[in-house]
Image: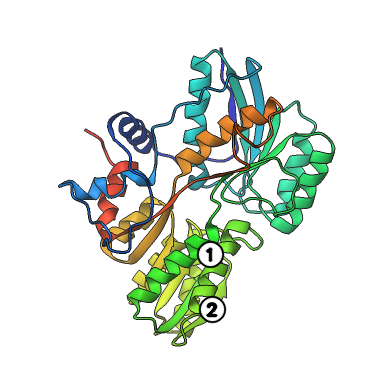
Amino acid sequence: MIIDMKRMGKTAVSLTMLFALLAYSMGCQTGSGEKLPDDMNPGDNINENKDINAVVGAVDFEHELDDYVPKKDSYSFYFTYKIVHPWWDAVALGMEEAQRQYLDRGISVTYEYMAPDMVSAEDQKKRLLKAKEGDYDVIGVDVADEEIISPFLDELMDENIKVMTFSSSDASDDCKRIAYVGNTHNYEDGADLTEALCKKLGYKGTVAILVGSEGAPCHEDRAKGAKDVIAKYSDMEIVAVEYDNDSIDNAYNLTLGIIDEYPNLDGIICCNMSNPVGAARAITEKGSNTVIVGMDHDKEALEYLKEGVIYCLGVQDCYSIGFDTIQVAVKIADGNLPGDLYPEKTDEITTIIYQEDAAGMLELLYGEVL
């Protein structure tokens, strides 16, 4: 039996990352993935191998399908997300594992996994228009722009097309989509990172925010969380807010411009996976002491974290997002509504890691496992 998955663009997940994921899924006991308690310092762990043990709970590779018995022996899904990017390749690894486990049970799950090279709500609408003509059991959407895409998802639902959202961006609260799997706490992630930055700076100084894609719910919510935290402290000021469209190059150039205008900039809050890398490249080039906080597990970002150029990163559990998306999609395809079988929103974790955690995360995700 052939299991088919189609993707647009280059796959950026390295073989070493894949092997590391598989090895740790078999060999590591994962933790809870919760944020550090108030009385624990970043990286504190009672085990000797602190670098690894501090991060194994951040990404859960030990997943098994639940006891639900699918009603069919084959399913076909269509998933579209914001942009071709390594973050969504990590989500795809979890999807592939769920797909494999269904195949072990004699159930074929095929899916298309499509995205543009640049974030565009209009491009996403065109993809969805094409997808609705296909014979898909469920269409899944990582929402590119809440205001533009949410009403369109309502139209699809009105045409009896089963629609779910997944990944990092849900639709608007009143959208008719059936369920969401992913990060339900983007606002809190932005607030938590900003609180860490404020504490590092002694609650005074000037900061900039690199948002990401305009209208993308996850990026906008993180930026709102950051702004609300800064507003609490009278000696802190936001001097620039820029959109980099989830591009490292854009983030690099924007940061250079901000540093030129504000040479004594104290901090930068980065709201997606690309902009911590671009910001770190820029401040390194400038020889700046600007403190960076940001999102996710880009290898270069983790290396900057290890070197102390980036202060902390909020790492999302992409693997779990992918696995749970497939499992929820099967239940939706069978006509099940949110309830006992699955929640209306499946919440995945974010873990904030610091310099002392960087080596462990690099080994966990990218390093050679002996």
Q: Is residue 4 above or below residue 185?
A: above
Instruction: Locate residue 193, reporting x and y percent.
Output: 43, 65
- Foreground pick, 117 / 4: 4
Instruction: Locate residue 3, reporting x and y percent.
Output: 56, 20
What SS does tag 2 mark? Answer: strand
User: Which residue is outermost to the bottom?
Assistant: 235
Q: Is residue 338 above or below residue 263?
A: above
Of pointers 1 and 2, the one earlier in the residue sequence: 2
Query: To which quarter of the image does residue 304 belong?
Result: bottom left
Closer mark to the observer between disc 1 and disc 2: 2
Which amino acid type is marked by label 2?
Answer: Ala
Q: Is residue 76 above or below residue 365?
A: above
Residue 73 relative to residue 317: left or right: right
Residue 232 relative to residue 111: left or right: left
Residue corresponding to mark 2: 240
Residue 9 relative to residue 38: left or right: right
Which amino acid type is marked by label 1?
Answer: Asn
Quarter of the rendering occupied by the C terminus? top left
Instruction: Locate residue 42, reporting x and y percent.
Output: 28, 60
What SS does tag 1 mark? Answer: helix
**What residue is shown at x 56% (from left), y 16% (from top)?**
2
Q: CA distance from mark 1 to mark 2?
A: 15 Å
From where the camera sits, is residue 366 visible?
no
**What residue is shown at x 50% (from left), y 58% (from top)?**
272
Q: Bin the neighbour count of mark 1 within 10 Å (Cα to Cα): few under 14, some 14-19, many 20 and up.
A: many
Query: To which quarter of the image does residue 173 belong?
Result: bottom right
Q: Tag on residue 250?
A: 1
